[in-house]
Image (tube, rainbow, N blue to C red):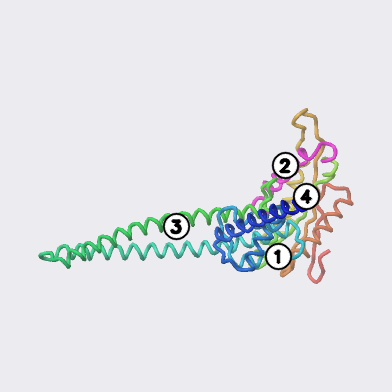
Amino acid sequence: MRIARAVHGEATQEDGRRLFERIGEFLTDQRLPPSPTHYAFAYRLFTDPDGQLARAVEMITERGVRLTPRDILTLNADHDTADTPVDVKERAEGLVARTQMQVEGFADMVTAMRAETADFGRDLAASAEAMSAVGQPTRQSDDAVRITAAMLERIRIAEEKLETTTREAKDLREKLEEARDNARRDPLTQLPNRRAFEEAFAAQEGAGGRMCLAVCDIDHFKSVNDRFGHAVGDRVLKAIADALSHSCRGHLVTRYGGEEFAVLFTNISLEKAQQTLDQARGKVQAKRYKLRDTDAPLGEITFSAGLTPVLPGEMHQTAFHRADRLLYAAKSAGRNMVQVGTTTPGEKYR
């Protein structure tokens, strides 16, 4: 019994020693000072490698971005309570955005340093030539020329390093921009997602101008998934996405979630928006869908939609809720139609 406890104790000490070493390596790699807060953060990270905190850190650091002390504080605060995967993703995206701004500032600084170094190098080279051209050389002038030549070589090496750093910063900035774009795009349909819709709505509302909002939903989509499987359902989603994107070109078409799409029409009348949606609906209904494996007909695919104008200064949640009610009115009325909410002076939207 004592021997077993001793062996267990030695194993526990060995595990603890290795954990301590890994924490030290992590802090060194991230260039974080060995403070109690940072040690505690790294301990949580390594003792729960599959947890939400670890996933958030992986998303931030996967492209070589180092954590900052401020990031540690933010992540600690964000993960003190049980977060959903969406929360983790959104906060990681916020850190990516802040990192991108830091990289852009760093790139600008390096560019300015390169310009100053190049100017200094040219001035120094001109001085060296001037010294070489002056009369009989002396020991002092030889020393000055030699020192100047050495400085020019160092400047040349510094310029090469700065050029490499500038290129790396540019590559990192492009990768971060790509990551931010991917966070606002639906991977299946390649349409902008709900986050992109909300940001576009806010930007358009701030800029002013007329807006109409449509919420579209595929009719009997659950039946498609149940009868033919999710792979066929995915094909239907992409087909609807393509039809809406083609018919509503020039306006924002997004996959809001599940089989639901949101379309933000800008600077056109409600009647024109309705005509555009009806054109898309007609294209979807007219198409004959078949199963790839057997070439058997899939049956008619349709969608319903609710369309409403947006009041000046109205929040997107309010307009969306109204369009969503109109969508369900279209479903109740028989599906495969666009239900429109209208307004007249002095009258509320209905």
Q: Which residue is mark 2?
A: 239
Instruction: Identify which residue is drawn at 69% across, 50% down.
Output: 186
Residue 158, how many percent across, how many down?
37, 59
Q: Amino acid at mark 3?
A: Thr
Instruction: Identify which residue is drawn at 80% across, 50% down.
Output: 217
Closer to viewer: mark 3 or mark 1:
1
Q: Which residue is mark 4?
A: 258
Q: Earlier in the sequence, mark 2 or mark 1?
A: 1
* Label 1 crowd bin: few (<14), some (14–19), many (20+), radius 10 Å: some
Q: Earlier in the sequence, mark 3 or mark 2?
A: 3
Q: Up-down: is 337 above or below 213?
A: above
Q: CA distance from mark 1 to mark 4?
A: 27 Å
* Label 2 crowd bin: few (<14), some (14–19), many (20+), radius 10 Å: some
Q: Amino acid at mark 4?
A: Gly
Which secondary structure, mark 1? helix
Q: Which residue is mark 1?
A: 78
Q: CA distance from mark 3 to mark 1?
A: 33 Å
Q: Earlier in the sequence, mark 1 or mark 4?
A: 1
Q: Up-down: is 193 above or below 148?
A: above
Residue 197, how many percent across, how many down?
69, 58
Q: Any magenta on residue 251?
A: yes
Q: CA distance from mark 4 to mark 3?
A: 42 Å
Q: Which residue is nearer to you in this view: 126 or 209?
A: 126
Q: Amino acid at mark 2?
A: Ala
Quarter of the image with the C terminus is bottom right
Q: Which mark is residue 166?
A: 3
Residue 53 quadrant = bottom right
Q: Earlier in the sequence, mark 4 or mark 2?
A: 2
* Label 3 crowd bin: few (<14), some (14–19), many (20+), radius 10 Å: some
